[in-house]
Amino acid sequence: MTVINGYEQSDREEKLNVLNLPSLEAEAKKIIPTGGFGYISGGSEDEWTLNHNSEAFNHVQIVPRALTNMENPSTATSIFGLDLKTPIMMAPAAAQGLAHSRGEVATAEGVSAAGALMGQSTYSSTSIADTAIAGHGAPQFFQLYMSKDWSFNESLLDEAKRSGVKAIILTVDATVDGYREADIINKFQFPIPMANLTKFSEGDGQGKGIEEIYASAAQKISAEDVKRIADYTDLPVIVKGIQSPEDALLAIGAGAQGIYVSNHGGRQLNGGPASFDVLADIAKAVNHRVPIIFDSGVRRGSHVFKALASGADIVALARPIIYGLALGGAQGVQSVIEELNHELEIDMQLAGTKDIEAVKHAKLIKINY
C-alpha cells in the first residue's frame, strides 16, 4: 500500500483469477478508499441510467447457430488500420491513481499485454507521454476534455501527437458535471494530482472536487470545434458522447472520422437512454461511413457480442478494468480484458461466427418488455 496526501493506494501486482467482471466491484470496494471508490463506481442522481446500461443488453437475444463446421473463432480486428487482438478497448477514464499507485501507466501495460486499445484521459493521474511509453508501442487514443483556454488544448494535443497517439477522442457530453451524489456524500476531493493539469496549467486538480475541475472545461462545444481539432492535429477525431442519430450526422458532417456512442457510463444525464438502446439506430444513420466505438454498461462477453452485432466496431469499458487495476495492477488489467475476451470467444463459437466481421452480421432477436 502506498500513501499519498493521506490517501491509500493499492500497489498490488498479480494475475487475477476472474470468475466474471461483475464480481470485481465488491472486491475492489474492500481496498479502494471510500471517496475514491465512490468517484469510480458512482453515477448521477439515483443512478437509474447507470444501472439500466447493463440491463439494456437483455433487450436483445443472440440466435445460436449449429452445424457451422467451425472452431477457434478469431477476435482479431482493426480500426484506422491499427491491428488489435480484440475489439475490447480501455475507455478513457480519469484519475486511475485512485485505484493504484502506478495509475494509467500500469493500465497501459496491461492493456498492451492483452492486445487491446487504450484510451487516455485528459484527467489522468499520469502524463500523456509516460502512459504512451508504458504501452510499449501498442496503439493509444487520447481523449480531450476541451478547455475554455485554447492554448491549453493545443498543449495537450501537441503532447499527444509527440507521444504517438493515433486518434483524438473529443468528449462532448460533459460540458457540466453530472449530479453525482456519492461525491457529495463523501465530500470527495481529488487527493492525487492530475499529471496533464500539472504540466500544462497552473492548477493540478489536487484538493478539488469534480465540479471545480469541470468549471475550466468548455461549456459550449459545436461542430466547428470538431473541425478545428481535426485541422490542428491532422489526426482522426472521434466524437464521444453521441446518443442520437442526429448528433452522429452532425459530427460526421463536421469532419469526425469516428463516432463514440456513450452516455459516460451513466455519470452525466440521468434518465437518458441506455447506450445500447440507441446504438442500432445510430449505426443505421452512420451507415459504415466511419467506425463506431461503444461503451456504457459492458460487463459480459455477450454484451460485447451484442454491441458488435448492433453496429459497433470497438467495444469499450472502464470500471471493471479499473477494479482489476486495483486488485492486481498491470497483470490485473490484463486478466480482466482476457477474461472478457474469453467469454466473447465462447459466444462467437456458439453463435457460429468465425471472426468479428461475422459477429457484425449475426442475428439478434429484439425482445419487447
Image (cartoon, grey):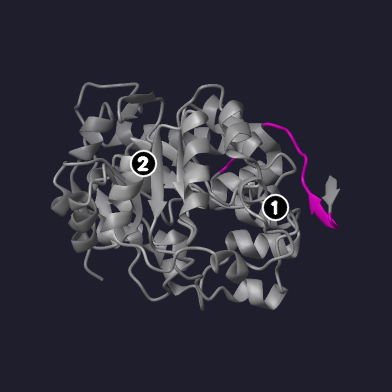
In this rendering, does residue 237 appear at all? no
Q: Is residue 214 magenta?
A: no
Q: Residues within 10 Å of mark 1 (few under 14, many from 20)?
A: many
Write the residue at 67% across / 42% down. Answer: 103
Image spot of residue 82 (x, y percent): 35, 25
Q: Residue at x 27, y 27 (%)?
A: 355
What is the span of residues highlighted in magenta in the rendered image? 5-19
N-term-proximal mark, 1 vs 2? 1
What amino acid is at disc 1?
Leu
Q: Is residue 35 above or below residue 113?
A: below
Circle 2 Cα neighbour tier, 10 Å, few/some/many (<14 / 14–19 / ≥20)? few
* Residue 14 within the magenta-colored segment of the rendering: yes
Which mark, residue 98?
A: 1
Q: Please state which of residues 47 and 338 is positioned toward the viewer in this rendering.
A: 47
Q: Give the residue displayed 16% in from the left and 41% down from the top.
A: 288
Q: Position of residue 225 (x, y in %)?
A: 33, 55
Q: Which residue is tagged 2?
A: 232
Relative to 136, say whether 308 is above or below.
below
Which circle marks residue 46 in the picture?
none
Dot 2 falls on a residue whose secondary structure is: helix
- Report, in whole angstroms, how far the alpha carbon at label 1 lies from the one at label 2: 32 Å
